[in-house]
Image: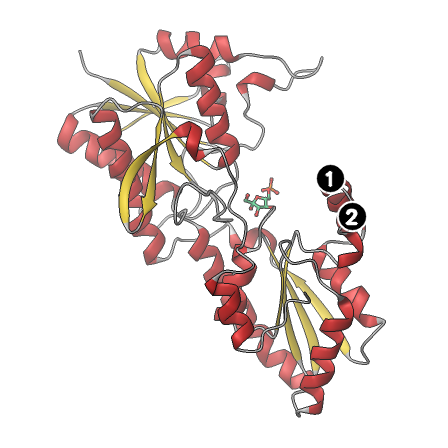
Amino acid sequence: MTRRIGICTGGGDAPGLNAVIRAFVKCSLKEYDWEVVGIEDAFNGLLDEPRRLMVLDGPSCQGLLHRGGTILGTTNRGDPFGWPSKGGPVDRSQDLADAVREEGLEGIVCIGGDGSQAIALRLMNERGIPMIGVPKTIDNDLSATDYTFGFLSAVEVARDALDRLHTTAESHDRVMFLEVMGRDTGHIALSAGIAGGADIILVPEIPYDPNRLAAKIQQRKALGRPFTLVVVAEGAYPMGMASVAPKERKAEIAASGGAGPLAMTLLRGLVDAEMRCTVLGHIQRGGSPIAFDRILATRFGVGAARLVAEGRWGQMVRLRDNHIEGVALKEAVARQRSVDVNGELVGTARATGIEFGG
Ligand code: F6P
């Protein structure tokens, strides 16, 4: 009886998802002769009627390595424990377990971020569905792995944007703000800021004092550099908001037009300079993965196949000290990784004169 293994992609997309699928399928066919069953739109493909599944074979994987997005589709609203319905969220986790059994799936490889992995853990613990996790997010804030694929591709997009903003800022003697993604953490802003030569980097881990930013801009002007590049993580906020609860704080930032426009507005009152703001948004999520992410995604896909072959359900593949290994899903979802404000990368940025506002 051929073993049938399910695979799905959940949460926000990221460059490299298709490379993981491709590697898992190629390894499964070459070394184990399994049948790989793609589940569309996270777990929805097993809960919708008719079910939306696709058998993944060699031809399915052609041209996937460099292709952004996910051929399986994904969703941020795919929680089987809180299934959206007219009357409000419904627990359909048992329906999912029934569907897995009816489809003859031995288990599911779930490629996703912290939210998806937390759901996978619950499905395993509460409904007995064998799960293997593959970490994915452009935010790179899963503490159980040194890197998630998609992160450095997003950093590269932001770096390119900064290079472009540099020439126009210099030409117009302007202060240019670039808002980047990172739902709760500032990894993209920090790395892109260093790579793109930003003068100021604002991250949620370091609430900023607008007066310090104004002083930096004035200092640059006095040194004959009357333009400034400011990278703003979408969760960054001024010190005045530090005592506001995170949920309310995010609402206040959104009401101000976002973290980038908010920082610009605060500085407009302190600095005599023309200012503009660019919000990079989902451009950081789209497009083809860079080489690093194609390699990491391929390593994760093969690593997931090894975990399945060894029967190590309940684990997630991860990169640790440049080795691919398995880690218990419960450890993987335990803690989000914030920017280390006392770490080497922030220290390096400060040592080159980059201002964080705090
Ligand atoms: O978690 C990845 C991420 O891109 C965050 O950086 C961002 O805040 C969020 O997803 C955007 O989610 P959505 O695609 O639902 O707008």
Residue 223 vertical placement versus 21 (above, below): below
| Dot 2 alpha-carbon crowd within 10 angstroms: few under 14, some 14 to 19, many 20 or more | few
Viewer-proximal residue among 252 and 96: 252
Q: How is the image coloured?
A: secondary structure
Q: Quadrant of the N terminus?
A: top left
What residue is pinned by disc 2? 243
* Location of residue 211 in the rendering, given as x and y in whole percent from the top left corner: 78, 71
Identify the image quadrant of residue 332.
Answer: top left
Residue 247's label in the rendered image is 1
User: Which quadrant holds residue 290?
Assistant: bottom left
Q: Residue at 33% across / 45% down in the picture?
A: 319
Q: Which mark is residue 5?
A: none
Separation of marks 1 and 2 at Cα, in angstroms: 12 Å
The residue lying at 45 percent from left, 52 percent from top is 151
Q: Residue at x 73, y 45 (%)?
A: 250
Residue 300 percent coordinates (x, y): 30, 41
Q: Nearer the viewer, residue 271 or 154?
A: 271
Residue at (75% x, 75% y) in the render = 214
Q: Secondary structure at mark 2?
A: loop
Residue 203: x, y in percent? 62, 58
Q: How many marks?
A: 2
Asked whether, in this view, residue 185 is left or right of residue 31, the answer is right
Amino acid under disc 2: Ser
Q: Secondary structure at mark 1?
A: helix
Please indicate, yes or no, whether residue 51 appears anywhere in the rendered image.
no
Q: Amino acid at mark 1?
A: Lys
Q: Where residue 284 sits: x, y (%)? A: 52, 54
Instruction: Determine whether, in the image, residue 5 is placed left or right of residue 250.
Output: left
Res 148 visible:
yes
Q: Nearer the viewer, residue 203 or 259?
A: 203
